[in-house]
Image (cartoon, rainbow, N blue to C red):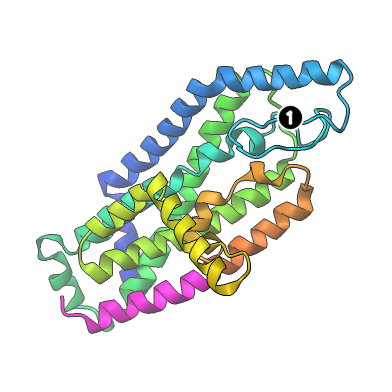
Amino acid sequence: MLNVIRMEIYRMFHSVSFYTTILLCAAMAGVLLLSQSNSINKYYDGASSQETAGMTVKDKVYVAGNDDEAGIAAGDAVNIASPGNVCDSYITSAHLFEGIFMALFVGSFYAGGYCKNVLGKVRRKGYFQAARLACVTIYAAMILAFTTVVTVALAALLIHAFTFANMGEFALFLLGEYLLLVACGTMFCFFTDLFRSKIPSLVYAVLLGTTLVLLIETVINNTAEKLLHKEFFIQHYLPSLYASDYRYGSLLGGGVEDVSKMLIHAAVLSICALVVYNGLGALALTKKDV
């Protein structure tokens, strides 16, 4: 099994798409931050002016990138240009490029007869699922780390009021983001193995950030609420959908306690997803003819 894992990791590091997707992810996050830096600066400059003018706790402010109102004072500890408040929405673009890479990487396994030559020399085909998981954990760590460093560095340069505050909360947020990336990456690998094609994973990765998925979520949630007679959110039960709602900005006023709760939610979803997708992935590799 270790030889299979080493072989797949070697193949991953020698694929052009590995470096291309990581660079594109960081570049896209940087370009988006650069294009929105003026509006972010105006927001924080305005918040600072309101605080100086004696803004009360009852006054409400808005956080860039967050659609919800935050009923907190401008002087509150979370209402500052910290890495979490500024960078969270840009970092989550990693899910798109992870889906693209995993679809290309696993899809290339079935191209040109490579899998037929390799699988016949391996005692158990399920070893390749362990190799998939190893590749996902490494790729998720690298794309998240590189995108975060680039985004935070640009924020420090471009945002006037930027400060390295609430770093403990930001670290917990990144841990949950990493767990979701691993879970989603495993899902993309499974879809590619299941269909023996990269197309389904590519399509799903692109659609995840569109209004079409939000519309489908709304329909499912409304239908479930009518049947169950209580609130229901499908995105709270699927890691790929929860990743779109996983935002540091949604925790305004909550502090470390709410960040920890969100991390626990992400961890539970990710663990369950890893068990399901790895189990099904190993079964698909073992039972289906190549």
Answer left or right for 42 relative to 226: right
The residue to which callout 1 is attached is: 61
Asked whether residue 86 is in view, the answer is: yes
Asked whether residue 137 is in view, the answer is: no
Residue 156: percent from the left, percent from the top? 62, 24
Quadrant in the picture for residue 118: bottom left
Chief secondary structure of the magenta portion? helix
Q: Residue at x 27, y 61 (%)?
A: 106
116 shown above or below 59? below
Q: Residue at x 45, y 45 (%)?
A: 94
Residue 142: percent from the left, percent from the top? 46, 47
Q: Amino acid at mark 1?
A: Val
Q: Residue at x 60, y 37 (%)?
A: 67
Q: Residue at x 35, y 61 (%)?
A: 188
70 shown above or below 223? above
- For label 1, the crowd category at 10 Å Cα-Cα, with few meaning under 14, some 14 to 19 and many 20 or more, is some
Quadrant in the picture for residue 225: bottom right
Residue 152: percent from the left, percent from the top? 58, 32
216 shown above or below 38? below
267 shown above or below 163? below
Please name whichever residue, 68 or 218, is drawn nearer the observer in this view of the structure. Answer: 218
Q: How many marks?
A: 1
Answer left or right for 286 relative to 64: left
User: Residue lying farthest left?
Assistant: 112
* Residue 77 counted in the magenta span: no
* Residue 278 counted in the magenta span: yes
The N terminus lies in which quarter of the figure?
Answer: bottom left
Mark 1: which secondary structure? Answer: loop
Please name whichever residue, 170 or 248, is drawn nearer the observer in this view of the structure. Answer: 248
The C terminus lies in which quarter of the figure?
Answer: bottom left
For the record, the magenta segment spans 270-290
